Image (cartoon, coloured by chain):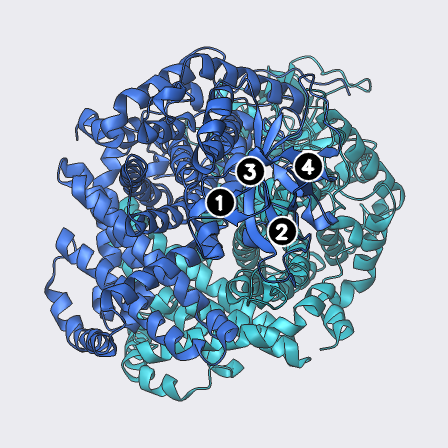
Chain colours: A cyan, B blue
């Protein structure tokens, strides 16, 4: 294979930006932290951030008029590459530039932009994104913090009504944040909270700019902040809890792109439906989710590079009187590393497709439908990519044995820091349900709710199902067409099935039907993500023969994993299913000689790989 | 259900010993460490150990004549319960009492016992188990450290011939160890190392007692020790590296139960075959492996208790205008927690069966076959239980969202500390191959190598396969008999298949055949462990109706996971396979109301669960 060609395909149109980040990470002192006391780690991360802002890297996605480069895609690509390095730096940058500055950009209007954007992207104004509460992390429409408008004072009163309503796990809060974008239930005229409130009294969740600390770093009156305490990972990020005790902010601190409150307390919004309004607001913040999936893919690349290179160096067992065999010559080792390698390539190409869609949506006035498609893709890829990272990093650690257990191997940080990726920016299980909901909406839209059309599709699926096993026997498993057809067939079948089940059940017992279909919904979303990911890989795989094989390995390993389903639905016979397994094994053997080049092509900076195991002084007993 | 009945079944004959450990863990100051600087953690663990020794808990498995209680089973049961608490304490105890003292007991003879056992079990003599080298962790028969007999001095010369031969990851080495059991290639008369050595010159790996530090804790001449540096977890254990530079020890420091060297350098051993000799020695150290699987099951119980209780408390989403729904009322949450709960119960019962076998073997002169069966069971259960721990603890962390990411939740330590369980005491992949090898030996023994008998079995399997799908349709999936038959059929089929494949391939290309059958070997071992685990659960499941359902949930969730295989082999039809999934879902709903009681029955001390999220001072900015 040509490592250069593959590297070019992986880096795509953002090659230059990604190389710049690689260069930065390769500078002495910028390598990821291996073992630093918490406060030193926090200080180092802050210093790194400051360095990055002076070089203009952190405002890239913002409008040129506020010092940015109007390059949303480049910004996310750069963020993804930064994830080769210290993930605390990544997450803290995500909080400051993605969430805090991003909320000001997307939820605020010109006066907010003019006043705050430069300060936020230059880190003059360190900020927080205070959405999650102890009581509500996933169901954020049900947050309990209130923002009550006081007509006489022309101010909002931000308040934490009870302990579960405190803001929790808020990045940048424990140490550095001076201001927060606070999400709270907007109460106009009457101070009646959300649940059981009078109709019209409660306007739903809105975002407010709330100063937290003065220029000396002292918390302001009415604000209480606590450090969340030691975490599983991401030591360099200062997560905290925030309580508000009737904190007053001027009326203009409402980020009012989607709703405003007049001096007399009149509430207006271009979006009438409160739920639609809230999710439109959330939708503008999607960049965070896209960034997390990109970061998880980069972290996975680091882990695979370390483990595969070790597998090509380390020998153990073998035949008597011969040199011991390389670990990567064992099939079990190939299975645990090369299948994730193929999946990581596939996700990497899918991620770039996602970045392209994100860039397109935010560079134009996109239609609702295009936004929904982006939301679906972002939710699905984020869930699949972050779970893939958790699993793969674990497999890589185990593949490196005891050496992988030393912090010098990098796995400690990779594991601990990425662990929360499956949770933040949306819990994966919740995200897959969101993706499924969107796919169902699309499905309904496509059919126009016409029962005849639905019946026809169902009949078509049935016919296909009765007929196909025989037909499929003829298809070459290595042909992209066969693979795509298997993925597509599965997704359509699952989606159609869950649509019918939900339609039937939801009228009688909505919650029962949802619970009963929940797995099926996850499957519908996951099968769709699988398809999109394969399509993304397929679009480039013909550029190099090794990539072509790797793409087949991705496709067939997914089919192998789902072969129970394929057989249940008559799409694969038992014999054909066994052939899938054999073909995966054959592909592993074909990929094996290229494993080293395939990880080289990721271009993970050497500074981000494992450290030399060096001498440590022995403590006195 | 009756929580008491279930608790009694879980604790079994070692209820009193397990309760004693629970009591100890519940004493103020004995709760697991949440966040302590490394050296303080190490000191605390050492102090805990000293406390445990004075109370006689650490010598339980040793002969009464050396202060023990001759209670091997009780010792392992006690160790398992200790894993509810701080896992650094557990592992350091494992090194000192299980590995170091255990090696003296099992590999040494009376003079070693008389001189060292009391000192080792009372911690007067802190010791190490120096087997693993940087270059060899799994293939320990190929260690490179040498022990050359010097006839004139009547001494062994222990030496590290090259960098890869340094002892690595050795617990107790960096700080506390005064002596080590060192595994080295015994060279008699001629100083020729293992590979390429003349026949007879190299006697293979043997164990030697080598002093490391004097009574002030200073390392002795010729010994170099380094701290391994920060690890992913187990901060309270002082792992180190050891180099030997021609270190001399008296001839009697050879642990000579299985081989001795006369003053004239003559080597004698009751076991002629060097490979058999080595594996006999290793076999006596099996208690460590059994202890690790027990510990991993306890750690899993802690994680499940935390996550399931939270799932019964925490609400999120639900129907409009109603109270939000409990997390554990969602099927996705049930799937991620209740299936592992069922598996944990199953493994817990299997572990007690393993302890009983261990106790039986070490309380009598067991036959080779009984020892091999124990070895197979220990290897298989260790691999399955430790992987189960890694997966389940991860699932529990995710099920607790952001709260699970705080160290106070306990998941940080549970994840990090158990991570290496899949590696130490035998890499899981290697262990499953060991188990498979033993199963194949047994299979061959049973058939007596008779080709006709083999052919008959093969034909029987084929006939069964052609006939069974229809027959199986009639079996009640909830009947234990049906479940056991499905498990047994699978194991026999897989084992027979791999035996045939290996037989065919190994003559032509031994390494190629092994690699080609490697997955199949793992499957043969894993399917056997599944069967044994189900049998262990089935033996007690009829004592309580909820346990009965839980046992079915274990059985059917395993069949669900392997339904691709069952369909490929004509054992389940597609329709039947779908019924398995539906039955699992129905069982989840049945178990759900008992989830709280089922974790209560684990009896995890409250002190070992999550801590209150309490105030942390905010650092000055």
**Residue B153 numbered tag:** 4
**Residue B254 numbered tag:** 3
Q: Which is more toward the observer, A418 or A52?
A: A418
Q: Do residues under tags 3 and 1 come within 8 Å of each other at their CB atoms?
A: yes
User: What residue sits right under mark 1 in the picture?
Assistant: B259
Residue A184, x across and y down, in percent? 56, 29
* As drawn, A120 above or below A219: below
**Residue A76 numbered tag:** none
Q: Do residues under tags 4 and 2 come within 8 Å of each other at their CB atoms?
A: no
For disc 2, the chain is: A
Q: Do residues under tags 3 and 4 come within 8 Å of each other at their CB atoms?
A: no
Q: Cα distance, mark 3 to mark 4?
A: 15 Å
**Residue A296 numbered tag:** 2
For disc 1, the chain is: B
Q: Earlier in the sequence, mark 3 or mark 1?
A: 3
Neighbours of disc 2 within 10 Å: few (<14), some (14-19), many (20+): many
* As drawn, A452 above or below B93: below
């Amino acid at each position: 294979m040509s490592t250069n060609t593959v590297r070019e395909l992986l880096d795509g149109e953002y090659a230059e930006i990604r190389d710049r980040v690689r260069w930065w990470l390769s500078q002495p002192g910028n390598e990821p932290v291996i073992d630093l006391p918490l406060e030193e780690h926090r200080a180092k991360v802050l210093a790194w951030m400051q360095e990055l802002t002076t070089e203009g890297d952190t405002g890239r996605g913002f409008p040129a008029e506020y010092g940015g480069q109007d390059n949303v895609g480049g910004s996310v690509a750069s963020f993804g590459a930064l994830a080769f390095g210290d993930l605390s730096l990544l997450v803290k940058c995500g909080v400051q530039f993605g969430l805090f500055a991003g909320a000001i950009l997307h939820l605020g209007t010109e006066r907010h932009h003019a006043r705050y954007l430069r300060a936020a992207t230059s880190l003059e104004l360190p900020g927080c994104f205070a959405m999650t509460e102890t009581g509500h992390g996933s169901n954020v429409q049900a947050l309990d913090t209130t923002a009550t408008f006081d007509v006489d004072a022309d101010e909002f009163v931000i308040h934490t009504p009870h302990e579960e309503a405190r803001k929790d796990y808020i990045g940048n809060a424990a140490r550095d944040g001076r201001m927060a974008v606070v999400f709270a239930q907007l109460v106009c005229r009457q101070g009646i909270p959300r649940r059981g409130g009078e109709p019209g009294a409660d306007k739903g969740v809105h975002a407010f700019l709330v100063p937290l600390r003065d220029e000396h770093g002292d918390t302001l009156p009415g604000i209480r902040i606590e450090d969340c305490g030691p975490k599983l990972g991401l030591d360099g990020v200062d997560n905290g809890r925030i309580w508000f005790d009737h904190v007053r902010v001027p009326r203009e601190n409402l980020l009012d792109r989607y709703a405003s409150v007049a001096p007399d307390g009149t509430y207006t919004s271009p979006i009438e439906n409160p739920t639609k309004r809230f999710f439109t607001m959330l939708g503008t913040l999607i960049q965070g989710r896209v960034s997390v999936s990109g970061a998880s893919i980069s972290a996975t690349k680091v882990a695979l590079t370390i483990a595969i290179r070790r597998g090509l160096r380390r020998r153990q067992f073998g035949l008597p009187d011969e040199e011991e065999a390389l670990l990567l010559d064992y099939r079990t080792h190939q299975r645990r590393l090369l299948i994730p390698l193929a999946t990581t390539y596939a996700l990497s190409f899918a991620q770039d497709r996602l970045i392209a869609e994100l860039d397109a949506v935010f560079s134009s006035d996109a239609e609702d439908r295009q936004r929904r498609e982006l939301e679906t893709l972002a939710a699905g890829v984020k869930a699949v990519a972050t779970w893939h990272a958790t699993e793969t990093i674990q497999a890589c650690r185990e593949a490196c044995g005891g050496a992988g257990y030393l912090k010098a191997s990098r796995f400690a940080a990779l594991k601990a820091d990425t662990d929360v990726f499956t949770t933040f920016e949306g819990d994966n299980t919740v995200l897959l349900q969101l993706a499924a909901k969107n796919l169902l909406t699309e499905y309904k839209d496509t059919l126009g709710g016409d029962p005849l059309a639905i019946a026809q599709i169902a009949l078509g699926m049935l016919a296909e199902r009765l007929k196909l096993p025989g037909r499929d026997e003829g298809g070459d498993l290595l042909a992209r067409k066969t693979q795509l057809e298997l993925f597509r067939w599965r997704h359509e079948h699952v989606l159609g099935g869950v649509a019918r089940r939900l339609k039937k059940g939801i009228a009688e017992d909505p919650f029962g039907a949802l619970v009963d279909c929940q797995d099926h919904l996850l499957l519908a979303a996951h099968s769709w993500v699988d398809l999109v990911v394969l399509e993304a890989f397929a679009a480039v795989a013909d550029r190099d023969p090794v990539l072509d094989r790797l793409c087949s390995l991705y496709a067939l390993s997914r089919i192998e994993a789902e072969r129970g389903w394929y057989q249940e639905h008559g799409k694969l016979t038992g014999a054909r299913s066994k052939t899938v397994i054999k073909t995966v094994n054959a592909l592993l053997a074909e990929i094996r000689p290229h494993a080293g080049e395939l990880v080289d092509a990721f271009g993970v900076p050497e500074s981000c790989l494992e450290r030399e195991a060096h001498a440590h002084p022995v403590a006195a007993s």
